[in-house]
Image (cartoon, rainbow, N blue to C red):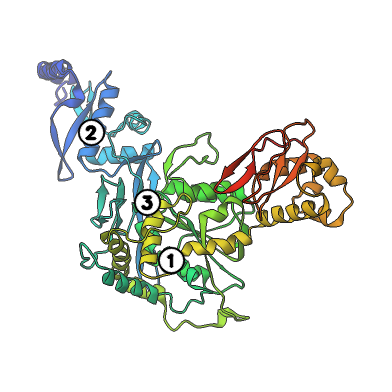
Amino acid sequence: MSSFPDANDVLRDAGADALRRQLDMNRRPYIGLQNGRSTANSRTLPIIRRDAGQLSHIATEAERHLIAAGVPFFQRAGKLVRPITCTVPASNERKAKTAALRNVTVGYMRDQMGQHVEWQRYRRREQDWIPTDAPKDVAEIIVERAGDWKFPPVQGILTTPTLRPDGTILAEGGYDPQTQLLLIAPPILPPIPEYPSRSDGLKALSVLDDLLEEFPFVDEPSRSVALSAIITPVVRPAFSNAPIHVAGAPTPATGKSFLMDVASAVAVGQPCHVIAAGRDEAETEKRLVACVLAGYPLVSVDNVNGELGGDFLCQLAERPLLSPRILGRSEQPIIPNRMTVFATGNNIRLKGDFVRRAVTCRLDAKAERPELRRFKSNPVEKVLANRAHYVAAVLIVVRSYFAAGKPVKPPPFGSYTGWSESVRGALLWLGRADPVDTLAAARSEDPELQTLNAVLGAWAQAIGTGRGSACTAAQALSRQIDHLREAIELTGACNKKSPTRALGNWLASVKGRIVDGRSFARLSDNTHGHAALCSLSRSHECDFGGFGGFVSTGWAGVVTLPFLA
């Protein structure tokens, strides 16, 4: 006879107690809401018991426990995200922390659910609740609950103290509900006056200016752009958008990328995160979208050869909210834009609408081989040796301007009112050149503007201006006039399968744009798509008879209609 008790006897003896426990659990309106506690890994964890028919309630309770435990989950652009930090080499064996936002996966959700909650399931064999792994289906429900999460929203992630829109300093690490920013591992700042004076601002600006001493700026506005490149990424949360800062030079190794590394050392404590410009605008957009989704605070499009522009780059420079298309998915989330963008290149040329969205720093070493130059000091090393000192200097520069009541009102600059009334205004108030003055040179080098100017000039000379000289795109192409043909070739129309239609489309894209007092317009009293060159002046209203003109800022112009080839 076996010395071991019969299993049926054990179950029969324990059956009454087990049944009572089971009935007690079944009477609970929601098994996941019980206040039971359990000790695991020397910690007391809340218990959630997996019970049939309660999946939705259990997911809600699990989310509540994760929030109570302080798990750093945030919602951004319809996704749950979490901060990730890593230590990267800076220079001279120094280390720097870099931070980004990453989507929360189902696997990681289960991991956190297992760390902060004890999960139990009922096993009939033991007639008791036993420990189990965090359920995958609960994790999937939480991850997919976009719009219903209780996790806080996040606009971006920083590793550097910054300014809030009201001018106050955000220096304490953690989540800031006012700005919805997450500040991770910030340097400890030296004391900053609550109301710094102009004298404090001048001293702080000289600290930053010392970093730029050996860079070969071609003029003072270029130097102001460099100062803005140092200041802007630190105080970027104080305004909704910022122009792109561009560094250009006639030859390689003049210091363009190094300049951006200096600015990045102050802003994020490491050399600048760079991406290469793609073969075309679409490829560059894909790389920038990846940076936006990761929440990088600063990125540089490095070593651009030739032209720089594109629709997404314009949006990135101007829009406080972005809706990029995610590669490989039919998704276009709405993402807060808190990124500062740099760009560098040799003889870089800004084109199209991008011209008015960038300020340009021009460097020229006046040397055949500038790479042989030696800096007397290393400004990146100076920053990394005492980064808090330079971050404080940036904050004092802008704070002193705020404390003085923003006494200098810069001229309007497109959509960049916030940046103008903080960074640009502070520089002007402290006696520096206007960084926006660099737009004139960039505009004169705009290849699209140069093409339009060439066609306008050749058209006026070969065909004439006004109603009596109107002609179709086909008639313009048929003119055997060399300089007109050469100008039209700049538009690319002559290389198309249908040059007439291509020229008509190009004219439609530039109609009404005034260059040197001239613009293209389409006549309204014909069906043949006649184009005429309208000469504008302050005393002359251009009216082709089919419709009246309009006046804008003192100029008379023509109400144009879509051009037909």
User: Which of the labelled discs sits on residue 64, or is there none?
Assistant: 2
Pointer 3 or 2: first along the chain: 2
405 vs 531, left or right, is left
Along the line of sight, the residue nearer the viewer: 484 or 235: 484
Residue drawn at (64%, 44%) of the image:
557
Mark 3: which amino acid?
Phe
Distance of label 3 from label 2 (alpha carbons): 34 Å
The residue beneath circle 3 is 239
Which one is in front in this view, the residue at disc 3 or the one at disc 1? 3
User: Label 3 to label 1, Cα distance in Å?
Assistant: 24 Å
Q: Quadrant of the N terminus?
A: top left
Secondary structure under the numbered disc 2 in the rendered image = helix
Q: Of helix, strand and loop, which one carries label 1?
A: loop
For disc 2, the neighbor class at 10 Å (few under 14, some 14 to 19, many from 20) is some
* Residue farthest along the right direction in this orientation: 480
Residue 527 in picture, x, y percent from top left: 78, 30
Residue 330 position, x and y percent, is 53, 33
Q: Amino acid at mark 2?
A: Arg
Whether residue 562 is visible, yes or no, is yes
Mark 1 residue type: Pro
3 left or right, relative to 292:
left
| Relative horizontal placement of residue 490, taking residue 556 as reference (left or right) | right
Pick whichever, 526 or 355, lies toward us.
526
| SS of the residue under disc 3 | loop
**Mark 2 or mark 1, whichever is nearer to me:** 1
In the rendered view, tell whether residue 459 sits above or below residue 445. above
